Image (spheres, grey):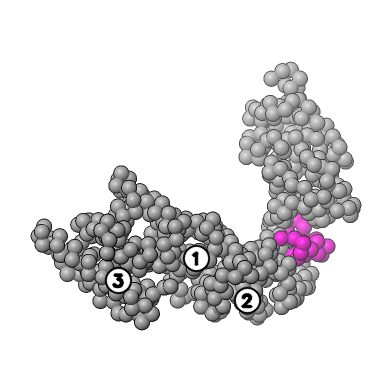
Amino acid sequence: MNEDNSKSVDSVCQLLGDTTERTKRCLSDILNVRDKLVLSRIVEGLSMEGSLQELEGSCSDAVKRVGSKSPAGDFLRRILFPRSRPGIFTAENVAEVLRSFPDAGTVPAIGEQAPVPSRSYESSVERNLRWFLDLAAEFYGDVFKDLTGAIMGITRNSSTRLAGLLVLARCSFTEACTAHGSHVQELEKFCSIPYSAAEAKFASRSILRFRRESTGCVNSTLERQKRRMLEALDDFEIEALPQAFAVGAELVRSYPRDERSKEIVQKLFSVFSEMAIGRLFSDGDPVEAVMISGMSAVSTVAKLPNSDAWPWHGKQDSDAHHPPMNMILKRVLLGETPLFSVLNESNSEVENLRMQAAKLVVKLSRTGALSTSADNILIVTRFVKTTKPDLAAKLSRWIFEWITRKKTPFKWTCAILFANFDGKATLVQTLIVSLRAAVARMQIDEAQMDNVHCTLPFLPESVLPVLAWVLAKDADEFHGLDRKGSPLRSFLSSLVESSEHAALTRSVLETVAAAEDSGNDPALTERIRAVAKYSLDLLNSKIDTENWEVEKLFIPLGLPRVLFKARK
């Protein structure tokens, strides 16, 4: 460190009243980031009582270049936000500092009403702004009393505004601001369009935190929010639905036992059900945002006390982790809607509907809103059948990845998947790849995986009965038992050769052979029985020649009878 830098360090240490070695090291770290001008500008800025014209350059540079968790960052926090000098951070000065960030030409001064051009900020700048706002809220929450509008107007970047709203919701900030009415009204603007559902959510949450300090103002604001929200839901305004869902969920979350919550809950459920049956699927772009915001609202409300009295409670659902989602998927998408009958049509008018439905399922799977219970997988595979190959492949990979990762019972999932895929080439290839990955995770020698007929026998025992039935079902793909060397014969032979599965396989095949005729397709029933008989003959031959001791099994298979019905 040269002599000039050393003098800068000493002068700042004296100003702070802290001459410890740790502080000097922190100052040296900052010097190494840029040059001595950073420190000299900070010193000059600390000597000023008014404008931050000299300080804003050093602020922008320091905040950009020094992480808040580093020793140097700790030091900068003390310099830029000294508790002993509150006058230095006025609303105007904070706005000046914020405007010193890159793209500052897009930021209007306080009081200017000119629209801010839509421009994408760099991720580093967003991080800096968030850190700046967070520090300012921690040390100088009262500044935001007059600055809310200016902070929110600095950028039209949704994630940055959202960061600001998250800061505004801090408890320390609400105490410092003492809930001025103008501030609440400013926040209220972010509860409706053109702002996002996330912004509406956190703005509403910030308002609700002011209940103790300004009860009358907050209550009148909440009444307006409730009225606007219910009007948007009643009118089914697509543009306003995401914000309405978010605000409604926050109101119910804050007043779970209030009478007003019951009305909101019923309305949320009613509108979301209408969306789920396809009322919005014909519209395109807004669909995903609306559905995801609705799903978030439903999930939030369903976790609250007394939610068992609400219409989507899922006590009877097979997957306890996602009761509201299972209810919606089962009752609305699968059972009580014409959606799938529309999806099964082939004319061009419903092509957009198919694409939106498939994209929605992909979105839900990515966000974790879909679980891998057997019923949900059945719903997803029905979507798979109706969509284009690229989306079908995405969905198929997701299904198999989660089946193997979460160890969902194979006797359900494989039956459902095979029965619905109907031997489509792209889906069969995806299936083979996924099954090989599952086998690899079970530490099976990959050298044995030359083809699907070698791979399948290594899967858990509960898969085997279903595979025999499915292979018999698809006569076009596997050509029955008439031809030597057919895939069906090869699979059954390798299955029988796998002695560790022999006892269970025999019991299962006896059950399959005795399956009742569904009445839909007698020929299919006969093929299933033929496969069972052929496999039993192979097993009995193996038992006779190698003197196997086969214990008679009375294990309930648990396979639903619907799996043995014909599916055209």
Q: Is residue 188 magenta?
A: yes
Residues at marks 1 and 2, CA–CA distance in whole angstroms: 23 Å
Location of mark 3 (residue): 528
In the image, what residue occupies the spot 51% across and 74% down?
A: 334
Location of mark 2 (residue): 274
In the image, what residue occupies the spot 73% across and 77% down?
A: 235
In this view, the residue in front, 333 or 133, is 333
Label 1 vs 3, first from the N-terminus? 1
Image spot of residue 293 (x, y percent)? 64, 65
Residues at marks 1 and 3, CA–CA distance in whole angstroms: 23 Å
Magenta residues (range): 173-196
Crowdedness of circle 2 by 10 Å Cα count: few (<14), some, many (20+)?
some
Secondary structure state at the residue bearing disc 1: helix
Location of mark 1 (residue): 385
In the image, what residue occupies the spot 32% across and 67% down?
A: 472
Q: Residue furthest front?
A: 483
Mark whose residue sits in front, 1 or 2: 1
Crowdedness of circle 1 by 10 Å Cα count: few (<14), some, many (20+)?
some
In this view, the residue in front, 184 or 369, is 369
Q: Amino acid at mark 1?
A: Lys
In this view, the residue in front, 416 or 213, is 416
Q: Quadrant of the N terminus?
A: top right
